[in-house]
Image (cartoon, rainbow, N blue to C red):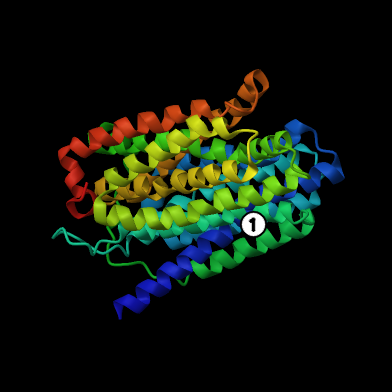
Amino acid sequence: MQRPSKLRSVTLLALAEVLALALWFSASAVVPALKAEAGLAPMQAALFTSAVAVGFVVGTFASALLALADRVPPKWLFAISALIAAAANLAILMLPPNGHGVVLCRFVTGVCMAGIYPVGMKMASTWARNDAKGGIKGDMGFLIGLLVGALTLGSALPHLFNGLGGVDWRLTIKLASAAAVLGAVIVLMVDLGPNRAPAPPFRPGAALTAFRDPALRLANFGYFGHMWELYAMWAWIGVYLAASFKMSGVENPTRWAAFATFAVVGAGALGSLIGGLIADRAGRTFLTIAAMTLSGAAAAGIGIFYGGPPALIVVVAVVWGFSIVADSAQFSSCVIELAPAGYTGTMLTVQTCVGFTLTLVTIHLVPMLADAIGWRWSFAFLSLGPALGVLAMLRLRDHPDALKLAGGRR
């Protein structure tokens, strides 16, 4: 009976996560339409998207301090967060598109995402097979990779919509809110697996364990290096490719760049799944080191192909998109396997809080560098993140606690 229940629960959980996080994904899809209809200034358009990320950072910080992800039943935390976020998103339709109220609604939506994304990973981890004997039966990396892969595909879809000519922003807002409500209903039907710990007592300093414990600290530093690169690449690769296509003489470069960006970001979904399978068999540090080495090299070297044959730079970008996500779920898997009993959700929340805070820095640095030196080499500095991440994971690989990872496969 366990296998059907596991398959059903993990499938429903992945579906609920994608539906609920449609509220986040939809921001990228509606901004072009809002600019055209409401005449949004560049700053207002940026706030429409970035307010969600800021809200997520604030929400994860508060959740980590209160250990909500471990002290509140996860299904209910997920469902309530999704319902509040859906209401905040729907309220946008009753407000002027260029007013401050819209930004506040997006901020509230971001805060609620803290009760969805890390909580979903914790729920998935309860179904992971134990692998104490060192066989190849453990599937923690694949399960978390499945969730991250689904979310990556959801992140790619707005670029496809834009390539096809954009969408009616009001309909998108309504559909995203309806999807989140449906996600809240579905998650209540998800069963938790056998790997559950009782809710821990409230400890104000519990979140600091993420940095006090040496192995956890190294796993988090690896993740921070990964996040330094990821969202800045996702945010600007479309603009980068459009500029490259224009230099190459491509007609309608913006439209073709939108299709290419869908392929680049979408490749990360496949990377996440394959990365999970490899990590479960060859080891977490092995996979993360390999993936960051490849993605860091792509960040440093993609400028070589800028303005050249469009097919060539798209291939390089797709390889980058594949490798930049292949390791993402494995940092979370490391934290799950290294976290103190009962505090898995809190450790995941701390990890995502700091990681997304870093993305707010690099997302803004890329266009500043592009203004200063041009787009060709504007991504090169992102390679610093994976370089430092590789060093952290090499150190974790040598740490005794690394034997807790993937059934002893470091």
Question: What's the residue at 79%, 38% (across, down)?
Answer: 99
Residue at the extreme front of the image, as rendered: 309
| Residue 213 visible within the image | no
Depth check, front residue: 175 or 149? 149
Q: Position of residue 345 (x, y in %)?
A: 37, 50
292 over 114 or under it: above or below: above
Q: Is residue 1 above or below residue 47?
A: below
| Quadrant assignment, res 207 | top left
Residue denoted by label 1: 86
Name the residue type under label 1: Ala
Q: Is residue 14 visible?
A: yes
Determine crowd level at label 1: few under 14, some 14-19, many 20+ residues with C-alpha closer than 10 A. Answer: many
Is residue 187 toward the left or the right of residue 313 in the image?
A: left
Q: Quadrant of the N terminus?
A: bottom left
Q: Position of residue 302 (x, y in %)?
A: 53, 34
- Residue 202: quarter of image: top left
Percent from the top left, x then y, of residue 250?
A: 74, 42
Number of disc labels: 1
**What residue sits 44% from the left and 45% below the top?**
323
Left or right position of 72 against 56: left
Q: Is residue 37 above or below residue 121?
A: above
**Along the line of sight, the residue nearer the viewer: 154 or 53:** 154
Q: Residue at x 56, y 65 (%)?
A: 183
Residue 179 lies, in percent from the top left, at: 63, 64
Q: What secondary structure is found at the residue carrying circle 1?
A: helix
Tell me which residue sits at (70%, 37%) in the image: 248
